Each structure stands twice: as structure tokens, then as C-alpha cells.
Amino acid sequence: MTEFSEQYDVVVIGSGAAGSAAALEATANGASVLVVEKSPESSAGGNTRVSGSGWFVNRDADRAQVFLRTLNGPFPVADDVVEAWAQATVGLSDWMRSMGADVGRSGDFHTEPEYQELDGSDCYAGMDTIGGRMGDGLLYGFLRRALEERGVEVRFGTRATALVTDGGAVVGVDVDGPAGRSRIGARGGVVLATGGFSANPQMVRDYLRVEEHVLWGSPASTGDGHAMAQQIGADLWHMDNMMTITGIRGDDEFGHFLALWGAQSYLWVGDDGRRFIDETATPKHGHTVRSGRHELFPTRAFHLIFDEAVRSAGPLSPTPDVLPVGWNMLMKDTRWSADNSAEIESGMIVRADTLAELADAIGLDADVLVRSVETYNQACDDGVDDLFGRAAATLAAVRQGPFHAMRVTPLLGWSNGGPRRDGRSRVLRTDGSVIDGLYAAGEVSSTYSWRKDGGFHIADALAFGRVSGREAAARAAN
């Protein structure tokens, strides 16, 4: 018989939205719960802590099933997962309110579905947040307080190193913390809520095929849960799906969000100096339309070329009063200058009097870049972009010097794939059988195999966190 230094009904690994929801639900169902979190308290919470912190409001479970299947498109997930997701994402705001949360509808972001043209999108009623405000760690802060009020211990600085099995079932977890190594038993099971693998460069290259990226979220997202689950035979699903947005590398592995919300006299060129896409195509949580279909974007770095009108139109990365999200802003307290001057002075933005000089400064063929800009400017004059179909209303010529360039790097928000699970959050083996006592929720095993809408990731984490906590508590009681 396996010996443990201590025993709980449920052990949750990770303290973000999924882990907190699992712990809260298990506790509400009478289970004794321990949350182990590898990060110190000052930086715990994973991507939840620095996210937009909103969850989509699902007004109709039946229509939500249709919407999710349409979003997944050619990459379906099992019917029981779709059905459980559609049911479990209904009523999340009521659940939050029942614990004392001040829930309010976001009036500025995700007021309607991004994919409103898809069948089932009428289930989407907007996005709720704490206090009606985006980001700023508000959701994590509320969940942390909710755990404290219910007496749930979160053991910070404690890394889970391996799952403990007995007869093929998970019965506990090995951890390494401030007091050293120990083995903790879990009568009902272990919930993996360890986040994704966006901070694991090898996994990003192997699974996402992204050679160069910067982090939007937590540096703790290193794929720990994936490795532990695989070690005991777990299958994997949609490991190649993700969300990237346009980013700018800071002075380390973290990035700033590039938001071109001012003047539109800019274009994007690849390392060959040529345009390659409609620069204003709407980014929809990691996907954009290219050649008539949705594709993951961006997956590689490129150059932003712009003129003085863009430079003087406002900051190229949002300020905290507009969008308080991301590790750089919330955890490192970095700020983009209001007029982009600090970034020019630091060399993050390259400036030159002529386009040819700009090309030389960033290592592009001057003749090619000048022709690319001239061709683009002619399209602006004509009001028609025959190359990439950029809308006439967005076509603004790049003519007002001095000229500027900035390297745009994929800003990796989250990975989607992880241990395959069923609609009860139970992790599955490669033969489809259930690994008894092991559950997964949140980014470690996101439901989304392809497209997703605003507030979907937090909703998924809360929903399947609750499912996993409830299932583990029930198993402990039997």
C-alpha cells in the first residue's frame, strides 16, 4: 500500500480559474481539498491572473452545442464533451454571484460574438467580468478570496513532480515544496489545472511550429501537467491549436500587444520586404481570414512599416486604462509611452528619413521595400487592394515622413492542447479508457480544437473546473 505524508479527498494542481473552480466546487460538495501551486504567492494564478478575466454568457445550451461544433469545424471533439461544455457554461455568472462576486456585463469588449456569421452564435449574450471591468487581475483576486473564505489551503511554491498511481488509478501526487519532498494522497483524485505550455520553447516548436515568439501570459506555463499525464499513459488532443496575437518583444521573453487603433497608414512585410496579407483583417482570438478561410495568425515574425501619422496617433500598445492585461503590464509594471518616443529612443522602433534608409536599417532589400510601399500607396490612391482585398476604408498611403519600422513577433497567449478528457473531465488513455482519479480542466486541456470566441477560455476553465471538482468529490465519497 502506498504511504502518504498527508491525505485529502481532492488535490488540485494549479490555482488559476480552473484550479480555483475545481477546489471551490469540491469543497461545496463536502470534500477536503488542497491546492498546490508551484509559483510563489506573488506571481501565482497562471494566465488567469493576467487575462482579460471575462467569461462568455451562454444564453442557450442547445444553440451553444451548435456553435461549438461549427467553431471546431473539421476538428471535432467528442459529443459528450460538447454537450457537457454547453451545459456547464450556462449559469456561470449566477454561480459567481452565489459566492459573493460583483458580476457585471462588459460594455466595451465582446458585446457580441466575433463569429456571429456562424450557426449557433445566437447563444452568445456578451461577456461578464468582475465589476464589469476587464483584466487587472480582478477574477483571480476574487477567486483567491473565495478560497480563503472557505478555508481551502493553497500551498504556494510547491511543485507537483509526478502522479502517484495504484492499480492504474491516480491516488496522489509527489510534490517538492519549501518543506522538501512529500507524497500527498487524494482519495477522490487529482485535478490537473496546470495551464498550458506557451512558456516551454521546445514544446512550442514541436507542437505549434512557432520558431520565434514572446509571452503574453505566465512564465509558469511550462507544460508540467502534460508531462505528468503522459508519464502514466494519457492521450493528447489538438496539441497544434493556440492563440497568438500581434506582439512586440520587450527586453526579455515577454511581449507587448501591438494594437493599431489609430491612423491606418501602415503595411506589413515579410523578411523578403513584400506584403503578404490584408493587414486589417479582424483577428479573432488567434485566427484571421486569409485566402477565404480562417487560419492561425500570426505564426511568424514580420515587419510593421508605418509613417509619422501612425506614430503620432497614439501608443502602439494599449495603456492600462484601456486594456489592463498581460504579464508585462500587470506583473512587471511596464508602460508604453504615449507618443511612442521612448520606444524610438530605445531602438524598439526604427526611424529613418526615407524608405530606402529604413530598409537598410532593418536589413531588407531597399528596392523591394520601396516597390512594396509604392504598390500599396497606388492601391490606396485607387481605392482597391487587388493583392489582398484590404477594405477601401482602411487604405491610407504611407507617405508622411519620417518613416518607421518595428519587428512584430507572435505574442503567444495560450496553447489549447493537452491530455484528452471526456465530458466528465476524466483524463483518457490512448485506447480511450479512463484513468481513474485523474481530471483535467482549463488550459492544460482546453475544449477548443480550432476557433474560439471572446471569453471562451475563462468560461471553459470555470465550467470544467467545476465539473472536475464535483466528480472528484463524488469519487472520494464512494
Image (cartoon, rainbow, N blue to C red):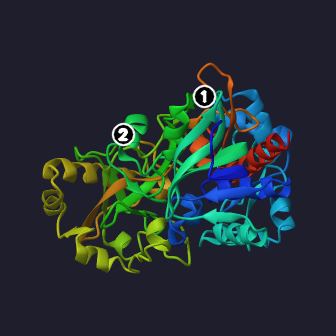
What is the three-letter code of the residue carrying label 2? Arg
Q: Nearer the viewer, residue 9 or 70?
A: 9
Q: Is residue 101 above or below residue 279?
A: below
State the image quarter where residue 333 is shown: bottom left
Nearer the observer, disc 2 or disc 1?
2
Front in this rendered view, residue 374 or 126: 126
Per the rendering, the mark at residue 205 is 2
**Residue 122 appears left or right of 351:** right
Write the residue at 17% across / 65% down.
354
Residue 59 visible from this viewpoint = yes
Q: Quadrant of residue 236?
A: top right
Judge from the rendering whether residue 290 lies leftward or rightward of residue 113; answer left or right: left
Determine crowd level at label 2: few under 14, some 14-19, many 20+ residues with C-alpha closer than 10 A.
Answer: some
* Residue 106, visible in the rendered structure: no
Which residue is situated farthest in the top direction here? 431
Residue 264 at what x, y percent from top left? 42, 63
Residue depicted at x 66% and y 45% = 190
Q: Residue at x 37, y 69 (%)?
A: 310
Horizontal side, residue 208 vs residue 158: left or right? left
Residue 75's label in the rendered image is 1
Q: In the rendering, at what x and y percent does residue 7 appear?
A: 70, 51
Residue 213 location (% of width, % of height): 36, 51
Taking depth in this image into account, of 318 and 153 the one nearest to the observer is 153
